[in-house]
Image (cartoon, rainbow, N blue to C red):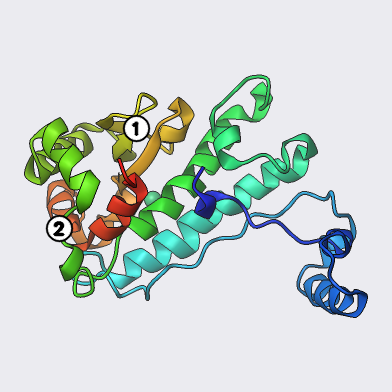
């Protein structure tokens, strides 16, 4: 589980005390937390998931992805997935504390049938976008990391024949996805690299795969600038892929 996808967990006063913090310090921290989060009364209360901030300004991906699109995509679309997911979790206390990965694995024993699709849509939406912001980065800053590094570079070569082939495959997956969805580079359950597309907000986590790079092909990701030209958007986005981040996600291989 990527720790970045783990929802923020509120710290209760008792857990601070258990952690061995001196009483005055613990009370200060707890009081500060309580001011920020008045619903903190019960340590067991569902932890609200927060919208992670964009790791760069909204205009950082210009001219390839415009500021207005980023503003709406992050501040409205991603925010809505988070809000709706919190709504589901608030109504199902038994799901609180479960990791996103756990919820998305779509185990009937974990997620009740009546909210399963909502967890997939909104939990998937939250997980997918949290990753999306991170695997992108300003082109100017990423020049030094314009290509996959280390073990990922090797694996791309042996699996697909190199970066250009990967780009072709992900482009094709994105173009062939009818309607809304994602194009993915993942490490599948058996450890191998794989490219596929998913519909709507379905997450590779649902199949036990680890997403390394996801490209959002919902119209909301590109329509303001590219309108119906998904092809152009899919070509442009390679200018702002942070291969340093994707390589780090792949790890030592
Ligand atoms: Mn999106």
Residue at image x 9%, y 41%?
162
Question: Label 1: few (<14), some or many (≥20) within 10 Å?
Answer: many
Mark 2 lies on residue: 236
Asked if residue 187 shows in the view, the reply is yes
Mark 1 lies on residue: 198
Circle 1: element type: strand
Nearest to the observer: residue 244 or residue 40: 244
In the image, taking residue 134 as reference, residue 33 lies left or right, namely: right
Above-or-below relation of 156 to 29: above
In the image, taking residue 94 as reference, residue 110 lies left or right, namely: left
Residue at image x 64%, y 54%?
49
In the image, taking residue 227 as reference, residue 93 lies left or right, namely: right
Mark 2 beta carbon near ligand 1 (under 8 Å): no
Above-or-below relation of 206 to 77: above
Above-or-below relation of 65 to 184: below
Instruction: Count the labels in the image.
Output: 2
Q: Quadrant of residue 241?
A: bottom left
Residue at image x 22%, y 62%?
240
Residue at image x 65%, y 30%?
115
Circle 2: element type: helix
Q: Position of residue 222 (x, y in %)?
A: 26, 56
Which residue ends up furthest to the right in the rendered image?
Answer: 23
The earlier-in-sequence mark between 2 and 1 is 1
Question: Label 2: few (<14), some or many (≥20) within 10 Å?
Answer: some
């Amino acid at each position: 589980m990527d720790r970045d996808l783990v929802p923020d967990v509120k710290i209760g006063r008792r857990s601070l005390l258990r952690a061995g913090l001196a009483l005055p310090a613990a009370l200060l921290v707890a009081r500060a937390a309580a001011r920020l989060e008045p619903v903190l009364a019960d340590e067991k209360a569902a932890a609200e998931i927060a919208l992670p901030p964009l790791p760069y300004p909204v205009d950082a991906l210009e001219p390839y992805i415009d500021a207005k699109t980023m503003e709406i995509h992050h501040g409205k679309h991603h925010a809505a997935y988070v809000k709706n997911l919190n709504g589901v979790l608030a109504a199902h206390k038994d799901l609180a504390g479960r990791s996103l990965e756990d919820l998305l694995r779509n185990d009937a024993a974990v997620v009740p049938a009546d909210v399963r699709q909502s967890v997939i849509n909104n939990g998937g939406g939250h997980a997918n976008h949290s990753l999306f912001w991170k695997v992108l980065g300003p082109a100017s800053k990423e020049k030094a990391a314009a290509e996959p590094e280390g073990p990922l570079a090797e694996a791309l070569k042996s699996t697909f024949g190199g970066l250009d082939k990967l780009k072709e495959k992900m482009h094709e997956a994105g173009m062939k996805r009818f309607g809304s969805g994602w194009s993915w580079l993942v490490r599948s359950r058996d450890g191998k690299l794989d490219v596929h597309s998913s519909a709507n907000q379905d997450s590779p986590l649902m199949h036990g795969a680890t997403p390394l790079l996801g490209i959002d092909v919902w119209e909301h990701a590109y329509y303001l600038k590219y309108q119906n030209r998904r092809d152009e958007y899919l070509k442009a986005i390679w200018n702002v892929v942070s291969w340093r981040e994707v390589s780090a996600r792949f790890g030592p291989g």
